[in-house]
Image (tube, rainbow, N blue to C red):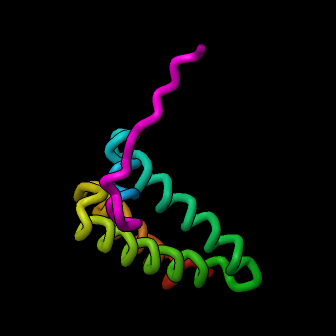
Amino acid sequence: MANYNLTNITDANTILEQFTAINSLTGDIFAILILFTIYILLFIVFKNYDTRAVLVTNGFIITIISITFLWAGLIGTTPVVICVAALVLSIVLFMFWR
């Protein structure tokens, strides 16, 4: 009989507790991959609009979500700083890219 690693997360009663358990099992990579996935999905959803506006919109939404993840204790400050820097860069590109 095969020996499977069946992690018991029955203590996780809410979605945040389950998310935290998965994130700790994956070494804090899960939340960052969720942010990246949301960014790509938003880019696909807004593909009919101007690319500059989509970059700013995605940067703003991802920054808000990353701040929420930071508040929940799912990610550290480095991903939030990267998201804010990407937002500032996209705003600068929006202003000067013709």
Any part of residue 10 in sight: yes
As drawn, which residue projects farthest toward the top?
1
As drawn, which residue projects farthest toward the right?
48
> Is 26 placed left or right of 76 in the picture?
right
Provide residue 14's location: percent of width, then percent of height: 36, 67
Q: Residue at x 41, y 37 (%)?
A: 7
Image-quadrant location for residue 41: bottom right
Query: Over which residues does the magenta segment extend?
Result: 1-17
Provide residue 91's location: percent of width, then percent of height: 45, 80
Image quadrant where one finds the N terminus: top right
Q: Residue at x 55, y 66 (%)?
A: 38
Does the segment drawn in magenta span residue 98? no
Q: Residue at x 66, y 77 (%)?
A: 51
In the image shown, does 15 or 83 lie closer to the viewer? 15
Provide residue 20's location: percent of width, then percent of height: 33, 55
Provide residue 92's location: percent of width, then percent of height: 44, 77
Q: Residue at x 68, y 80 (%)?
A: 46
In the image shown, does 61 or 24 lie closer to the viewer? 24
Dominant secondary structure (helix, strand or loop) of the stretch shown in magenta: loop
Image quadrant where one finds the C terminus: bottom right
In the image shown, does 97 or 10 lie closer to the viewer? 10
